[in-house]
Image: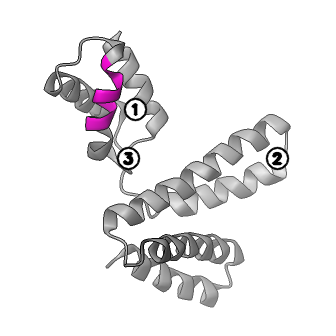
Amino acid sequence: MSLLERLNTDIKQAMKDKDKEKLSVLRMVKSSIQNESIKHGRDLSEEEELTVLSRELKQRKDSLQEFDKAGREDLVHKLQGEIAIVEHYMPEQLSEDELSAIVQQTIADVNATSKADMGKVMGALMPKVKGKADGSLVNKLVQQHLS
């Protein structure tokens, strides 16, 4: 079942359950995927759907940090709920140890020796962990292993 089909099924269920928060989030995610599909002029691949989903999750996490800094607990609580809903559709995240092993392997594969090779490493690494790890964590680990 594709992500869009899962979203449609879950939207119907949220309507039946009268779960307004979940319904709202699912509609926003579905809308983002459909807008991206229209932009490309075709149906999206699973990887492209995952990219859109990752972008939605990142936007919410960034907003969460900003609201937390501003002391807006009402909005923080709302966003935490939205993040939990979106994360339900993401693939299982890699642990830091698993990610570290992939980073070390990629560094060896591209023969990187210094921070100057960071772009080369990130370019080879990101497709491997797309949707399975936070980009900022990947960046931090690559910097640690290259220094």
Q: Earlier in the sequence, mark 3 or mark 1?
A: 3
Q: Quadrant of residue 126?
A: top left
- State the extent of the magenta-drawn residues as a range: 117-124
Examine the structure image and report whether residue 122 is included in the region drawn in magenta.
Answer: yes
Gap in angstroms between the C-alphas marked 2 and 1: 29 Å
Q: Answer yes or no: do the residues labelled 3 and 1 have beta carbons within 8 Å?
A: no
Residue under label 3? 93
Please say which color scheme the image uses.
one colour
Where is residue 4? Give x, y as percent: 43, 78
Q: Nearer the viewer, residue 37 or 135?
A: 37
Is 75 above or below relative to 39? Answer: above
Of the image marks 2 and 3, the number of the one nearer the N terminus: 2
66 versus 146 height, above or below: below
Specify the amino acid type for callout 1. Val
Using residue 136 as the reference point, say whether residue 15 is left or right of it.
Answer: right
Secondary structure category for the residue under label 2:
helix
Residue 115 vs residue 141, the one in the foreground: 115
Q: Main secondary structure of the magenta part?
A: helix
Q: Pick the quarter of the image with the C terminus.
A: top left
Q: Mark 2: few, some, or many residues within 10 Å (few <14, many ≥20)?
A: few
Q: Amino acid at mark 3?
A: Gln
